[in-house]
């Protein structure tokens, strides 16, 4: 909120508790019968000047051009208001590649009656000429935005992507952030900026060396644990073989942890059998399921499409 919507951020009383209402939003989406959609975030917050009043903030992230997007926000907004009878702010973050697409409203008129919505929109491409400013910004979403733009810019150029990813990784350690924030941000950057196997190995070697130099032995817990397993096996089977296996296990655990987080945020607490299935899955299966999350309306949809 602070990075993308500073005006709204300034109106929220952050001293008061806030609550994520993902299940409620999922029900609204289902009731709207709009087909398979990515459920974004619905948050109940208090305003600075509202006393005991509170409002709902609905943040929608759109990854591709969709002519029906403004109408969908309008539909979600009025259905949320109809359900809670409270003000609802709909905010849009656009991560698509269309430079000329930036919807801000949906309106229709009939017989002198006008109905619609006007919503704030942030376009990630608008930051394309601000890369250096993003890298200097201490807000973590500045780095997330930079990672998105670097991913787009380096498509088809693995060496350039390696350099950009390594630059972002080093910045994580220069900010003196806490361990969990570094783990979370590195996971996002790693998910966005995929590299060929050899370059990924080179990058992880560099990061591992950096961690030792700054006495901060973590990038992602899964990657670290995977390397440790590889080292232990290397004592018995040879150091090189162990390291290779450790990195592979680390990648699997990292993919599983990230997908588990995505599913939990989308569908709530995960059953034990789902967690067990993720732990036993191959990297290829995990990547396939992660793609399915975009359109899935239930956990069954995620796995049925595999």
Image (cartoon, grey):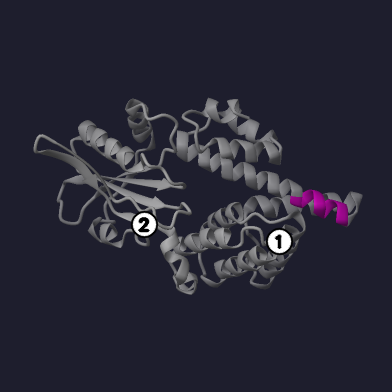
50 horizontally vs 154: left or right: left
Magenta residues? 240-247
**Residue 19 percent location from the top left of the image:** 33, 43
Q: Residue at x 52, y 69 (%)?
A: 176
Q: Which residue is mark 2?
A: 122
Whether residue 229 is visible: no
Residue 269, above or below 205: above
Whether residue 235 is visible: yes
**Residue 57 percent location from the top left of the image:** 29, 46
Confirm whether the magenta stretch covers residue 241. yes
Q: Residue at x 36, y 53 (%)?
A: 102
**Residue 53 percent location from the top left of the image:** 17, 46
Q: Main secondary structure of the magenta part?
A: helix
- The earlier-in-sequence mark between 2 and 1 is 2
Q: Compare residues 251 and 37 and report the one nearer the observer.
A: 37
Q: Which residue is mark 1?
A: 204
């Amino acid at each position: 909120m602070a990075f993308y919507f500073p005006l709204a951020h300034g109106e929220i009383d952050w001293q008061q508790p806030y609550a994520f209402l993902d299940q409620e939003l999922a029900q609204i989406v289902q009731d709207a019968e709009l087909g398979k959609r990515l459920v974004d975030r619905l948050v109940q917050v208090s305003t600075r000047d509202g006393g005991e009043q509170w409002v709902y903030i609905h943040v929608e992230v759109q990854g591709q051009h969709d002519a029906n997007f403004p109408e969908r926000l309008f539909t979600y907004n009025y259905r949320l208001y109809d359900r809670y009878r409270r003000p609802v702010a709909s905010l849009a973050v656009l991560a698509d590649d269309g430079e000329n697409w930036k919807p801000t409203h949906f309106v229709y008129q009939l017989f002198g009656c006008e109905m619609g919505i006007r919503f704030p929109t942030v376009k990630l491409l608008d930051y394309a000429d601000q890369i250096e400013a993003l890298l200097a910004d201490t807000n973590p979403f500045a780095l997330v935005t930079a990672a998105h733009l670097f991913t787009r810019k380096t498509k088809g150029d693995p060496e350039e992507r390696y350099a950009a990813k390594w630059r972002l990784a080093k910045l994580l350690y220069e900010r003196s952030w806490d361990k969990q924030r570094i783990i979370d941000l590195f996971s996002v950057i790693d998910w966005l900026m995929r590299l060929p196997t050899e370059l990924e190995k080179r990058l992880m070697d560099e990061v591992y060396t950096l961690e030792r130099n700054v006495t901060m032995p973590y990038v992602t817990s899964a990657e670290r644990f995977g390397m440790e397993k590889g080292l232990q096996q290397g004592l018995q089977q040879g150091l090189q073989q162990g390291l290779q296996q450790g990195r592979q296990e680390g990648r699997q655990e990292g993919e599983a942890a990230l997908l588990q987080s995505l599913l939990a945020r989308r569908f709530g607490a995960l059953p034990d059998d789902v967690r067990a299935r993720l732990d036993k899955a191959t990297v290829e299966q995990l990547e396939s399921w992660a793609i399915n999350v975009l359109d899935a309306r239930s956990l069954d949809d995620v796995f049925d499409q595999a």
